[in-house]
Amino acid sequence: MRTLTGIPETQHACIEARRNGRRIGLVPTMGALHDGHLSLVRSARSQCDFVVVSIFVNPLQFGPNEDLARYPRPFDRDRQLLESEKVDLLFAPDAPSVYPEGATTFVDVEGPTAVLEGAKRPGHFRGVTTVVSKLFHIVQPDFAFFGQKDAQQAAIITKMARDLDFPLQVVVCPIVREKDGLAMSSRNAYLSPEQRKQATVLYRALSRMQTLADSGERNSSALIDAGCQVIAEEPAVSLDYLAVVDTETLQPIDDVSHGALIPIAAYVGSTRLIDNIQLHGVGEAHRLVR
Ligand code: PAF
């Protein structure tokens, strides 16, 4: 595995790979890798001949009161993990190379960025879509891999790639969960052992909603009430939002007959966690992604 920090060198290595007829897969990450990231890398490995993973803790997507400074950065461990997954190229730029002084161009996706995480974290998605566009330009992948855990991010990036005619396919991979259902996240590292147990209530709430929908409940409010009741059983967890939305526009819907995304965000102590499930429309196979 080559490790490169420079943008021109990375562009050159990717152009060279393409010239040699290799199909390029990109897995953008902020490091602190866990099995969720590694499942993206494995998907990329199985579908592509040249796998590029980026590690960049993107300052542009953190708000002023968010965890940029304390975001975990176990770089050597990450590099070893990627090496053992047979990644071809690790791209790990620093912030001044990605955002040189005077850079004032940003990518803004209107619509689905205004709700849910976008409403709670102003500017967050502008930071995500700007850095992901830059990575798309630098690497020029055929496939780019993102996790369903950040469902809103995946929907926004899919839309951005379509709207801006990026010649690549966005692949969204299923959420990877711990045995007790907690969705894997780099931010789980902030949780104390007690908070780690409390955090499983997010998945219990989603599972309860899934069970209700499977048994025929179509009404979004009824589903949300049931989910909120489960969250209330864990007083240490404070709900930020629980919603039933359209899978593409992310706008709230009243009825889940044609499928829905159910995103949740909650604080466990000062750690903000997100998770989601997707309900399939009537007639489609219902599936709880594990
Ligand atoms: O999901 C993430 O880790 C980040 O938002 C991403 C896509 C790497 C952009 O910084």
Image (spheres, rainbow, N blue to C red):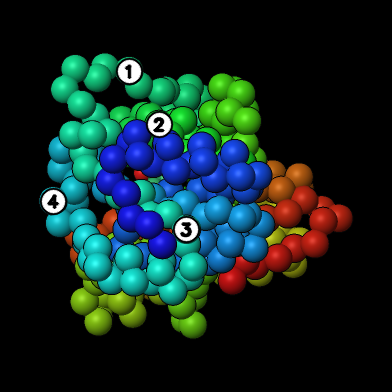
Horizontal and vertical percent position of residue 207 = 57, 69
- Check the picture and name the quadrant holding the C terminus: bottom right
Q: Is residue 180 left or right of residue 104?
A: right
Q: Amino acid at mark 3?
A: Asp
Q: Given the current orientation, which residue lies at the most extreme right position?
A: 283
Image quadrant where residue 278 sits: bottom right
Q: CA gap, disc 3 to disc 1?
A: 30 Å
Say which residue label 4 marks.
69
Q: Amino acid at mark 4?
A: Ala
- Disc on res. 105: 1
Q: Is residue 204 left or right of residue 173?
A: left
Please give the name of the residue rendered at 61% of the width and 55% of the height, measured from the top-left corner. 49
Near mark 2 (Cα within 10 A), the count class, few <14, some 14-19 or many ≥20, is some
Q: Is residue 109 above or below residue 9?
A: above
- Check the picture and name the quadrant holding the N terminus: bottom left
Q: Amino acid at mark 1?
A: Thr
